[in-house]
Amino acid sequence: MENIFEKLSAEQKEELERQFSIYAGGVEEIIPSIELKQKLARSILTDKPLKIKLGLDPSAPDVHIGHTVVLNKLKQFQENGHIIQLIIGDFTGKIGDPTGKTAARKQLTDEEVKHNAMTYFEQFGKVLDMSKVELHYNSKWLKELKLEDIIHLAASITVARLLERNDFSNRLAEGKPISLHEFFYPLMQGYDSVMLESDVELGGTDQHFNVLMGRHLQDHFGKEKQVVILLPLLEGLDGVEKMSKSKHNYIGIDEKPHEMYGKTMSIPDDLMIKYFELVTDLTVEEKETVKQDLLNGTLHPRDAKMLLAKTIVAMYHGNEAAAEAEKHFTSVFQNGGMPDEIPVVVVDFDGEVLVIDLLVELELLRSKGEARKMILNGGVKIDGEKIKDIHQNLIVVEGMVIQVGKRKFVKLLRKEG
Amino acid sequence: MENIFEKLSAEQKEELERQFSIYAGGVEEIIPSIELKQKLARSILTDKPLKIKLGLDPSAPDVHIGHTVVLNKLKQFQENGHIIQLIIGDFTGKIGDPTGKTAARKQLTDEEVKHNAMTYFEQFGKVLDMSKVELHYNSKWLKELKLEDIIHLAASITVARLLERNDFSNRLAEGKPISLHEFFYPLMQGYDSVMLESDVELGGTDQHFNVLMGRHLQDHFGKEKQVVILLPLLEGLDGVEKMSKSKHNYIGIDEKPHEMYGKTMSIPDDLMIKYFELVTDLTVEEKETVKQDLLNGTLHPRDAKMLLAKTIVAMYHGNEAAAEAEKHFTSVFQNGGMPDEIPVVVVDFDGEVLVIDLLVELELLRSKGEARKMILNGGVKIDGEKIKDIHQNLIVVEGMVIQVGKRKFVKLLRKEG
C-alpha cells in the first residue's frame, strides 16, 4: 500500500492534502498519520468512503459542547463524504456493573437504551447530518459471543498489556481490586471495530488504550487496521476539570441561547483559543486570525469571548438567536460593567430558596436586612434581571450570575452530587 | 451446620471418625477439615452420598501409577458409598491452544475426546468400580456460556487474586507473556463444580489454586462450598521429577507384569515408603509395619522393594501374575547379583537399533568387536534375557535393563521428546 500515492493525479494529491490537513487540525495524535493518508488516497482513487467510528456510552446521553470536539471532527469527515458509524455500547449498559459496586453503572432496560440512543440522535443532529449516519447497537454481535469465541479473543492479548492501562496499573499498585470482567471492556470495544471494519476511530485522549485495542483486534482477525485519532479533552467552565455533566461545569448543546451565551462568557480567558479551536465551526484561517489578533493586542479578550459565545450560539440556534443573545447580554451587563472574569461559587442548594437567604448565604450581603434593602433599591440582578420582590424564591441554575450593586458579581455552579 | 455433630448417635460418630481417618490418610491438605466432617456427618444422618469430583485433561489419557494416588483416594470414597464425578475437560481440549504456541495443546476432535475418555474409563476400571461412576463432559455447559454469563463469572474474581497463582506471578515478574485467555481455565474448572454441585474435589498439590476456584465460584453462585483435598505428587523412577509420561519416568498401569515389577524395583530406596503410602492398597496397619521394620532394620530394603513391586503388580494383574513376575525377576537377576540401585542412562534412540551399536554407544563395551565377542560368550542380557544373535535389533523401551557380564548393569530411560 506504500506506493499508492504514486497512482494519484496532481489534483487527487491536492485533494488528499486538503482533507488530511482538515482532519489533522486540533487533534492530539493520529496513530499513524501515514495510514490515514494511505486510506484517504485509496478512498479518493476508488471513490469509496472511509468508515469513521465513534463509540457511545448509552448511560449518559446528555450532550454538551465537550462532546462536540469529537462531533465536529466527525462532521469534517462527513462533509467530505465519509460514513459515520455511531456505536451505542448497549451491551455493557444492559449488563450494568456485575459487582454491584458502582451505582453509576446500573443496569439499563431495552427501553432506556433505546430512549438514550434517540436522545443522542436528536442532539447529534445539531452537528451531523443524521440521515447519513449509521447507528449500531453492539449487543447485536456481543450477546451472541460464546465462551469459545471469547477465549480466542482473549488469547490475542496479554495480561501485561492490559495492566499497562494507566488506571489498571495504578489500582494494582495501590492494592485496589480490579475485577477480571473489567478486562473485557476494552476487548468488547475493540471487537466492535472488527465487526464494523472501521477505518478510523475517534476518541478523547483518555480513550487511548481502548481505541488502540480496536486496531489490535482487527489485526488479530486479519482485517485492515483502523487509524486512531485522539482528540484533546475540553476543560469545563471552571477551567480545570474535563467538561462533564457530573462536574456541573458544562454548556449543554440544547441550552437556551442566552444561557449558552452567558456560560461561554464565563470561561477563563486562557481557554478561549482552545474553545475556538475545538468547538467552533470557524475555518482554519478565521481561527488563526483570532489567535493572532489576540496575541498582538488588536482584539480585546472581552470582544474575542463575545465572538466565541456568538459563534457557539449560532451553531446550535442560528444567527438570529445568536445576535439576540449578544444584544441581551450587552444590554443587561453594559451598565453594570460586568468584569472579564466572574468569581465562581459552588453551591448545593436543592429546590427553591429565598433570594434574600441566598444573598446572605453567599456572603454577598451581611444580613437579611441588608439583602431586603438592596432588593428594594433595585440593586440585585439575577442573570441580568432585576429582582423586585423581597419574598421571591428561585431555583439555583447552573451558571446563574448574581449581581449585587454595580461591581459585585458571582456565578453559581452546582456541587457535584 | 456447626452443631450437626450433636445429632449423631455414638455409632454414627464412630462411623464418621472411621471414614474421616481413611480420607485423611496420606493427603497433603484438607481445606477445611471441619467442613469435610460436617458433610460426612450430614451424609451419615441423611444416608445421602457425597459427590466427589475429579477433573481430567482429555489430551493425556495414558494412566500411570502417579495418577493412582488420586484414584486410590477416590476408591476409598467409593467403597464407602459416595459418588464419584469424573469430569472430562473436553471443552478446553476442543479449543486447543488459541495462541498456537504450544503444540502440546493441539485441538482435539470429538472422536479423539471420546476415545481418550474411554481410555481413561478402561484404565480407571482397574482401580474404581466404573459402573458406579458419573462421567461428565464439561463442554456440555461451557459451550453454552455467553459473554454475559462470562462477565458475571469474571466479576467474581480479581486480577490480583489470579496473579497470586505461582506460575502467573512468576511469569509476570519475568516479563513472560500471559495470554488473557489463560485466566479463564481456572474459572472454567471452578464452574464445573458449580454445575455439578460437588461436595469434595480432589487434586494434586499443583492444582491448589484451580480446585480452590471451584470453592470460590460455588460460593459466588450461592451453592454450598466444596471441600478441597490436595494429594502429594509422586516422583517418578528418577526419584526427582513428578511422574509423567513426557518425562519418561513412569510406570503405566497397563504395562505387563514383569515390566511393572522391574520398573518398581528401579525406584530409589528413599521413595519406597512414599510409594507404599500412596500407590498400594495395603491397609494403614500393613503400611505402618513395613515402615517400622525398615526403620529398625528387620526388613531389608531389597525385600521391602520386592514386596512393593509384588503388591503393585497384584493390584493390576492379580496375585498369580505378581507371583510369576517375582519369580521371573529373581530367576533372572539372582545369579547376576543385581545391585540395589542400577545406574540410569537417558537415551534418545528412535526406531530399531543394533544391540552391538547400543553397547558401544552406551560405553558398556569399547568396540563393536568386543560387543560381538561378549554376545557370543552369552554375556549380554536385556531385561534378563540372554542375547544370542550378534545381528539382533531392538527397540529401546522405557526402563529396559541391559546387563553386560556379571556386574555391569544399566537402565535406559528415554529422553524427553
Image (tube, coloured by chain):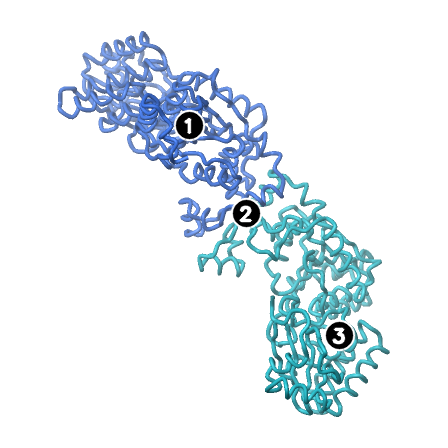
Chain colours: A blue, B cyan
Q: Which residue is mark 1?
A: A42
Q: Front-most of A1 and B291?
A: A1
Q: Tell me the amino acid under the disc marked 1.
A: Arg
Q: Tell me the amino acid under the disc marked 3.
A: Thr
Q: Quadrant of residue A72?
A: top left
Any mark on residue B280, and which?
Answer: 3
Q: Quadrant of residue B119?
A: bottom right
Q: Quadrant of the N terminus of chain B?
A: bottom right
> Disc 3 versus disc 2: distance between alpha carbons?
42 Å
Position of residue B86 relative to residue A305, above or below, is: below
Residue B295 visible, this angle:
no
- Of labels 3 and 2, the one closer to you: 2
* Callouts 3 and 1 in the same chain: no
Any mark on residue B417, and which?
Answer: none
Residue at x 53%, y 60% (from the top left corner): B167
- Of labels 1 and 2, the one closer to you: 1
> Disc 1 versus disc 2: distance between alpha carbons?
32 Å
Contact, mark 3 vs mark 1 (Cβ under 8 Å): no
The chain that hosts pointer 2 is A
Residue at x 69%, y 78% (from the top left corner): B400
* Callouts 1 and 2 in the same chain: yes
Contact, mark 1 vs mark 2 (Cβ under 8 Å): no
- Left or right, B303 with respect to A339, comes to right
Residue A414: image location, x then y, percent: 36, 27
Of helix, strand and loop, which one carries label 1? helix
Residue B224: image location, x then y, percent: 69, 51
Q: Which residue is mark 2?
A: A155
- Left or right, B169 with respect to A403, comes to right
